[in-house]
Image: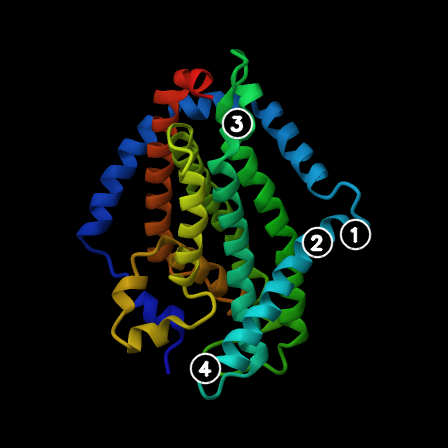
Amino acid sequence: MQAPSDLAASDTSPGWTIWVLAAAAVWAALSLKPTARILLEHRRLLKSFVVRDLKVRYVGSSIGFFWSVIFPFINLVVYMFVFRLILGVRWGGDTPPSQAALYMLVGILVWTAFSETVIRATSTLVDNANLIKKVVFPSEVLPPFLTLSSLVNMSIGIPVVLVFLLALSTEIEGPKFVFDAGRLGLPLVALPLLIALQAVFTAGLGFFFATLNVYLRDVSQIIGVGMTVWMFGTPIFYPFELVQQKGYGWLIDPNPMFWLVEAYRDVMLKAAWPDWMMVLRFALVSLIVFALGARLFQKNRQSFPDLL
């Protein structure tokens, strides 16, 4: 039986879509200069906002940043209980529970950082209306600082996953996963690239939805529901091969978060390099999404003080 990423990789061969995305990405790169310049000029403010958000998030907490590790594990226990014990969903007849647990944990870790940022960024302009109304305040830093804050939390959880991986490496074997502690180090150098691409994609969506929410406050409610639908449309709690065998793989394959989650799983769980064609597609889409979101934000930012 093929691994989920092997099945996905068979559907990601180069085609005309790559050329279309590449052309759009070139346009996007040329459009990023204004926003990139503002973020670079105000990098100290951006850093201070990230630090403040991390401090406020855990103020008064006795275990501090450790909560960023606990939450994914709580979600894992809940979903494992529902999907495996109650609904009986399996990754395959020979898949041990520990393997499925790690597979789900990586997905939960990545998705939590992504969804949290998009939801918070959607309402960030409304929540910070007092700052937006100050003429000198660079509102462009708001969605990116939320993105960086969530990625810091996610990065704290990554070593925990790797520790569990090494602890269970003698138990988890089989055709889908190859856990070899001796080879674990090299593919991990791809993690910074994946995190950077995730930041670009997430911040782009944050710019886009934050702008829409200024004009239509229902957007924040719609995004909350939409993220739940998107989560279950991403193979986090079930294997992609299961959907593909049912004939619905075409619904999952265009999902950018599917590409990203599978890349993380390849690097962290399989001691393997990610499918570079899948990473390329995600990089191109991320650049386009960021450019479109930033342009929409820049075009409407002068109207924000009056609308808020």
Q: Given contact means CB atoms under 8 Å apart, are the residues at marks 1 and 2 in contact?
A: yes
Which structural element holds mark 2?
A: helix
Q: CA distance from mark 4 to mark 2?
A: 34 Å
Image location (x, y in percent) of residue 2: 37, 78
- In terms of sequence position, does the residue under pointer 4 or pointer 2 come before the other? 2
Image location (x, y in percent) of residue 128: 56, 26
Which structural element holds mark 1?
A: loop
Badge 4, how many Cα within 10 Å: few under 14, some, many 20+? few
- Which residue does the image show at 57% across and 46% down from the upper left? 151
Residue 169 visible? The answer is: yes
Circle 1 sits on which residue?
63
Q: Please, which residue is most extreme toward the right here? A: 62
The numbered disc on residue 67 is: 2
- What's the residue type where badge 1 is placed? Ile
Circle 3 sits on which residue?
141
The reply, left or right, for residue 27 in relation to residue 302 is left
Q: CA distance from mark 1 to mark 4?
A: 39 Å
Vertical side of 109 occupied by 76: above or below: below
Q: Please, which residue is most extreme toward the front here? A: 218
- Which residue does the image show at 53% across and 61% down from the upper left? 108
Q: Please, which residue is most extreme toward the top here? A: 135
Front tag of 4 and 2: 2
Circle 4 sits on which residue?
175
- In terms of sequence position, does the residue under pointer 3 or pointer 1 come before the other? 1
- In terms of sequence position, does the residue under pointer 4 or pointer 3 come before the other? 3
Vertical side of 158 occupied by 146: above or below: above
Q: Given contact means CB atoms under 8 Å apart, are the residues at marks 3 and 2 in contact?
A: no
Viewport quadrant of the N terminus: bottom left
Q: Nearer the viewer, residue 257 or 284?
A: 257
